[in-house]
Image (spheres, rainbow, N blue to C red):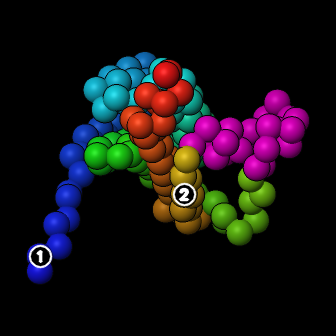
Amino acid sequence: MKIKTTQPEQVFIRFKNPRYLRVIRDNTEVIARKMGFAEDQIFELSMAVDEAYTNAIEHSGRVGSKSELEIEYLIYENRLEVSVKDSGCGFDCERLEIPKTLKSLHSSRGRGLGLIRILSDGFELKSQPGVGTMIKIIKYLQSRQRAILAMG
């Protein structure tokens, strides 16, 4: 018996001088729409990716030509996975407390990772001091059957 494995379609973008937030936002929205995501899901996904990208620029610790960002979109049949990776200074994830609810996002600073977690269906954070940080955002397509039942 053969097990069918479906490889995702990949879209990969690398910026040496990462000042192209609008390109990332537009790309995220176009991919999500073509996959069939609902508008509220597209909004949540776009906000989460915006926040991850902005955090990477702000907190990578590198400026100008030393800065490099990679954005990878893995397009599956039932989900979209977006990874934002920087080549910055990194940090110790063990010492980080990420808010899990909107009520715990009380500060005007440091809310990014909590917001990303709340807006995503899946969230992964990897960072290593001196190497960089990777944030993976996973968003699942709503079941078409649930959407049809909700409309009927």
User: Which quadrant of the figure has residue 148?
Assistant: top left
> Which corner quadrant holds the N terminus?
bottom left
**Magenta span covers which residues?**
99-120
* x and y, in percent, of residue 32 in the image: 37, 30
| Residue 40, horizontal then vertical, whole percent | 54, 24
Residue on which the image places disc 2: 124
Q: Is residue 62 visible?
A: no
Q: How many marks?
A: 2
Residue 44 at x, y = what percent? 56, 30
User: Is 46 or 93 nearer to us in this picture?
Assistant: 46
Q: Residue furthest front?
A: 152
Residue type at mark 1: give it.
Lys
Q: Secondary structure at mark 2?
A: strand
- Residue behind mark 1: 2
Nearer to me, 102 or 79:
79
Q: Is residue 15 left or right of residue 120?
A: left
The answer to if 115 sits in the magenta stretch is yes
Mark toward the viewer: 1 or 2: 1
Q: Secondary structure at mark 1?
A: loop
Q: Residue furthest bottom?
A: 1
Q: Is residue 94 left or right of residue 26?
A: right
Q: Is residue 15 left or right of residue 62?
A: left
**Residue kind at label 2, given as amino acid type:** Glu
- Going from N to C along the chain, the mark reached first, 1 or 2, is 1
Residue 110 within the magenta-colored segment of the rendering = yes
The residue that appears at 74% across and 59% down in the rendered structure is: 96
Q: Residue at x 11, y 76 (%)?
A: 2
**Residue 49, placed above or below residue 113:** above
Task: Depth check: give the residue in front, 139 or 14.
Answer: 139
Are there few (<14), some (14-19), or many (20+) residues within 10 Å of tag 2? Answer: few
Locate residue 98, reporting x and y percent.
Answer: 74, 53
Is 50 on the left or on the right of 29, as rendered? right
